[in-house]
Image: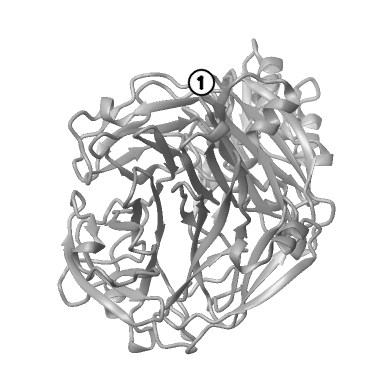
Amino acid sequence: MLDIATFDARGGGNVLYKALAHPLAAEALAALADRLAGRPLALVDPEGYAPALLALAPRPFPIASVHVQDVGRVGETVAGHTAAALSELAAQGAEDILIASFDAGRLAEQLRKRLPRARIETLDAVKLPGAMLSAPRYLDRLNFATNFAFFRDADGLSTRLVSANYWAGYGARAARLWLRLFDADGRVLATWEEAVPPAGFAVDSAAVRARFGLGPFTGQLFLHVVGAAGHDVVKYALDTYGAAGGASLSCTHDANAWPADRYAGIPAPDTEERVVLWLQNSHATSIPAGAVSFDRMGAESPVAYPHEVAGFASVAVDMGTLLPGLAWPAQIEMRAGRHVVRPRYEVMRAGRRRIAHPNVERADLRPDPAILALPAALGRGFLLPLPVLPRGRFRTLIQPTPMATTQAALPLRLDVFAADGSLAASRVLGVLPRNHDVALDLDAILPGDALAEGGHAELLYARDIGGAADGWLHALVRAEARDGPHAAESSFGAHVFNTLMTWRDEPQSYSGPPPGLSTRLFLKLGMPLGKARAKSFALLIYPASAPWHPTSQTRLQLTAGSGAVVAETPLAIPCSGSALVVAEDVFSDAQIEAAGPRGYVLVRDATCRLFGYHGLMTADGRFSLDHMFGF
C-alpha cells in the first residue's frame, strides 16, 4: 500500500498528496531525481512529507541519510533510515541536500551558511507554474481543484463529460481547464487548456479526437480547474454513448478525487454478463504486480491482479476470469492500495454496455450504538434515497453494499414511497452479513399497479433487531427495461435529511455547517444520439428523516451557457415523495434552443434538501442513470 495520506472524511482532501501527484509535479520530480542521481543525498524532512514524496516520485532518490528538525522525531524510521537530528548535517559534511518541503527558502539559507559547498534543493523545484495557481499560498486546496475521468473514444463508444462552473458562484473569474489525456499505456496523447464558460461546460471525446488527430483511445482524462474559488472538488457527470447509432448508453458521476485503500459495491456478473473493472493508475509510479487484489465481499480470500500497471495506464480486469464461478448477486471488493482514484466497472450484455463506479470502503469506522438509538427529533435517522422508475416500463432491484471493513451485521429495512409521499410497502431485510446475497426485486413486495408513474425507496437501519450501525450505509440500485436488454445502475450512501436538529455533521450542507436544508442540483440537458435526441430526466426525491414542510418549494431554472436564466418553473414535491422531471418536456423547444449546447437545469430549493438521480432516455429504449451532484 502506498504510504500516502489522501482523504479524511472529517478534514477533506490532503493537499500535499495532490501537489505531488499532479502530472506536472510528477514530471518535475523525475527531473529532480535525475539531477540528484549519482551522489549520496541527505534528505531533510522538517514537516513529515518524506513518505508521500518518495511514494509518488517516479524515479528513486539516492538517499544516504534522513534528518529531522523536531527533536521528538529523532530516531524514527523514515524512508528506511533512522532519522538523525538536523544539527548533525554539518558534521556529516553532506554535499547534496533535498529539503522535503515547499517554500523552504529560509531553512535552505540557514543550511547554506553552515554548509556553503552543499547543493541544496527544495520541493519548490516541483511546483506548478504560477499561471496555474488559484491562491497565493502554494499548499492551498484551491490550487489543486483536480480530478480524473475515464475517457474513451474507441470500439464505437464515445464519452462526454459535463459539469457546471459552480466556482463562479463563489467569486471565481476567468476560470479555465487544464487537461491532459493519457492512453491505455499511460502515454500523453494531448495537453491543452479551455476556458470555463460562465455556466455549463462539456468535454467530448469525439471532439478531442478530431481536434488532435488521434486514433482510437481508451484511457483517462486529468482535469485541473485553474482560477477555482470556494470549492476544490471537480464534480462531473460522464456519459458513455454508442457513436453512429450504437446501442450503448450509460452515465456515471464523480466527485471523489482521492485514492482509497479499498472500494466496494462491484457486482459479480449476472447470467450472460461480462464485468470488467477499469484499473486506472492515478500516479506516475507504476503499480507493482500483485499490489491490487479482488475478493468476494466477506470472503477474505483476495486474488491479486498479477501484472504491473504502468504510470497513468488503464487496464480492463475481467472479474469473471480473475474470480471464476462468482455470480450475481455476489459482490466484489477491490483492495486498491491507494493506487487509484475511484475506479469504474463496465457491464457488457447483449451488445450493450453500462458503466458505473464503486464507492470508497472505509477502514476508519467502528459501529456506533448511538445511531440505533437516535432521539425522536431525528425521526428515522439515516436514509438512503433510491429511485424507482415507472414500473410499467422498468424493473428495479436494490442491493445493500457493505462499505466499511467493520460492517459485518447490518440491520436494514426498506421503505417504498409513491410519488405523492404515501408509504407503498415496507420490508425488514434482516441483519445482513458481509457476504450476503440480498438483491431485492421490488416486484416481490409491490402490487403490479403500484408506482406505475415511479416513486422512490429509502434504505434505513432497522432498530431493535440486533446488528450494528456506523452511518456509512450504501446500496446499489439497478433498473432494467422490461421490454429489452438495456439496464442502468447507480450507488450512493445514506444521510440524515431535512431535520432542524443536527447530529454530528448531519444533515450535511453543500456549504456551511449543518443542517443542510437547501438544494442546488445540476441536471444536464439532452444530447443528439445519431438521428435522434436523448431527453434528459431527473427523479427528484424529497426524503425526510422527520416530518418537514408538507411540500417543497422547488424551482427548475433553465440556465444558458452564458449563465443567464432562460426560463423558470415551480415544482411542489410532497414530503417523502418524488417527481419525475423530463427537461425537454418541462421547457419548450425554443427555450431549450436558447439555453444552447452548454445549458443545464439548476434544481433550486431554499426550504428543503432534495436528492436526485438523473440520466438520458431515448425513444428506442436506451437509458442511463446515476445520482445527481450539487454545489
395 left or right of 22?
left
426 left or right of 51?
left
Vertical placement of 459 versus 492: above or below?
below
The reply to whether residue 131 is visible in this rendering is yes
Colour logic = one colour
Q: Position of residue 184 (x, y in %)?
A: 53, 22
Q: Nearer the viewer, residue 307 or 209?
A: 209
The residue at 71%/60% (across/down) is 592
Q: Position of residue 527 (x, y in %)?
A: 62, 48
* Quadrant where the C terminus is found in the figure: bottom right
The residue at 50%/50% (across/down) is 619
Q: Which residue is mark 1?
A: 310
Q: Nearer the viewer, residue 458 or 53?
A: 458
Q: Position of residue 281 (x, y in %)?
A: 50, 30
Vertical placement of 369 versus 34: above or below?
below
* Quadrant where the N terminus is found in the figure: top left
The residue at 71%/26% (across/down) is 210
Please state the total of marks drawn on the protein image: 1
Give the residue at the far top of this rendering. 38
Which quarter of the picture shows residue 554? Answer: bottom right
Q: Amino acid at mark 1?
A: Ala
Which quarter of the picture shows residue 561? Answer: bottom right
The residue at 33%/62% (across/down) is 392
